[in-house]
Amino acid sequence: MWQERKTWLTRLPLPVPETLKTPLEAAEFEIGQAGVRAAFTVEKDGGESYEILPVDGGYRITGGETGILFGAYALIRGLTTGCVPAGRQKPFYPLRMLNGWDNMDGTVERGYAGRSMWFEGGRFDYEPARVRQLGRMLASCGVNVLCVNNVNVHQPAQHLTDTLLPDLARFAALLRPFGVRLMICIDFSLPMQEGLPTADPLDEQVQAWWKERAKKIWAAVPDLAGFLVKADSEHRPGPNTYGRTHAEGANMLARAVAPFGGVLIWRAFVYNCMQDWRDTKTDRPRAAYDLYKPLDGQFDGNVIVQVKYGPFDFQVREPVSPLLLGMEKTNLALELQLAQEYTGHQIDLFAMPPLWREIFDGMGKERAKAVAAVSNLGRDENWTGHPFAALNLYAFGRFGWEPDIAPETVIREWVRLSYDLAPAQEDALTELLLSSRDAYEQYTANLGLCWMVRPESHYGPSPYGYEFDRWGTYNRADRNGVGIDRTDAGTGYVSQYPEALKKLYENPETCPDKLLLFFHRLPYDFRMKDGRTLIQRLYDDHFQGCARAESMKGVLESLPLPDADKREILERIDGQIKNAREWRDITNTFFHRLSGAADEKGRKIYE
Ligand code: GCW
């Protein structure tokens, strides 16, 4: 039996009844420990927006059915942080979706917080109390859609569109009171698995089949948000098999879901995953733009193309995907990943707001119509494996409402809502989290050198792990230098950017250090802007990043956190330190062996 574990807003009393359908006019509720009273006025058609007004002896929250819920949580947050939002509030992105990569056998692809919270043994299997708690968590930070199954749709998830519909409907009903709607991933070849000779999107039988199926699905879950599709990517079926474009594939499905107000989300994560490492012409980061840019303007109005933040795949540091800048006539969703696949497996600390700040600023928040993030949740008692990883889920919801939010603001908010700390301790934890990505980057992927990671697990160093493989993720380090030339003299990737960015990136003198080896191939004695050589910088960052990880332990030990959190956090920091030392020593030895260069500071580099 799952025991409720305190975490940010779930520590606070439920501010509104469990069914939003209950008329709330004139109702009064105690909010928070402070005993502040709030009254609610439900506006018809108010949607997700709300306004909080101080009234005699408390507050009045006016808003739509879900708006009052968001308003109630905003009030709790505001009372805790000392900043109650003034004026009418509404989310910047109407669709703010969490993507569960949950398989129906109970495993979670890239999951680091235990097994699936809602699937086991080929079916839905959950504790209703916990799912309601999940609904509260999502509502409290503003997430409004949950996609329940993995984008890689394995058997028997196909049945989510058929025999499992009553179960899907029951699950949807549990989350509905919290303003959270469901989405499901579908397999493009589903009609064939059910007896049709083809899944060709231009085939009328196929079109009719999907329309019929959509009717059945929406009859069971009338407020289903839509379908999410991974097609022609990493061996998933898709329209290419029939010589059709991705726009033709997406539009066919979009027309099936349109009568029910559904959206069709089509992922743009498509590249050649069978590349030959000897082939230096193909450059994986180019792939999505090369494929999708020519289709700009061809997608139906209820299609949203979901683009990962960088051109590769959720790395520690990538430039903003040029597709996010270039698809001007297409609805786009920005895809983030809370699951710490390349960012420390929820063992190493990696608070994501600083990374996202760069992405939203680089993209321009209005370029996207929606935001999505791969979930970091699982059945672990603390929800996210590392208690602090919950920050990333919370922050994702907050960015969906206020994409201009400052990383420090959202981190401090979460810290204050989650723990009772004295001001100096709160500062220390906020600072530690705020700088955690930077430290992780220094010991794993400095200067834009990603992918030096153990294949498959994606945890721990392996400088040549991907070098002679088929994934298009090479560093081409040799005795002369390291990195890939992505200027026009090289793979030409840089030309996918608007002129100003292209200019910035194509010159090693102006290219930001943190992306230097992503865009350029340089010799070890290249002089960096700060006067250090490239090799010295490779060494220095690895030593420094590791030292930063080591120094986190003392800060964590000094914090008065709840026992269970503290135990898990201290266990995990030991894991992080071990990992950081491996990265430092293996990467430094790798480059030392290739370059023959000594460390100017004479530190220990193994032979
Ligand atoms: O990064 C890769 C992951 C896969 C994942 C894929 C995707 C769901 O390693 O596990 O598959 O991305 O985003 O589709």
Image: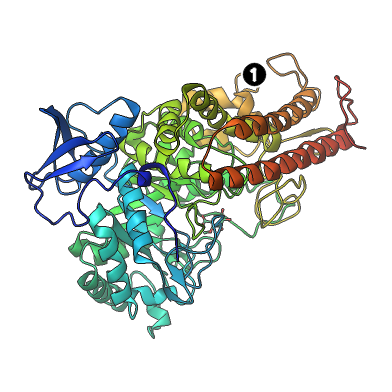
Residue pushed farthest right? 607
User: Which structural element holds mark 1?
Assistant: loop
Residue at image location 49% in from the left, 27% down from the top: 426
Quadrant in the rendering for residue 180: bottom left
Q: Is residue 79 above or below residue 385?
A: above
* Residue 75 point in image, percent of width and height: 25, 35
Indicate the position of residue 568 as horizontal and vertical percent values.
Answer: 60, 47
State the image coordinates of residue 355 (x, y, percent, origin top left). 51, 34
Name the residue: 66% across, 46% down. Answer: 571
- Tag 1: amino acid: Glu
Alpha-carbon neighbours of circle 1 within 10 Å: few (<14), some, or many (≥20)?
Answer: few
Is residue 594 or residue 393 the one in the foreground? 393
Residue visible at 39% across and 66% down? 127
- Residue 549 relative to residue 499: left or right: right
Q: Is residue 410 visible?
A: yes
- Between residue 221 and residue 569, name the one nearer to us: 569
Type of colouring = rainbow
Whether the residue carrying mark 1 lies under 8 Å from ligand 1 is answered with no
Q: Closer to the camera, 214 or 479?
A: 214
Asked if residue 299 shows in the view, the reply is no
Q: Is residue 323 left or right of residue 172?
A: right
Horizontal and vertical percent position of residue 166: 28, 76
Residue matched to label 1: 509
Left or right: 99 in relation to 555: left
- The quadrant the N terminus occupies is bottom left
Where's the C terminus, which quadrant? top right
Ligand 1, by image quadrant, is: bottom right
The residue that appears at 61% across and 30% down in the rendered structure is 558
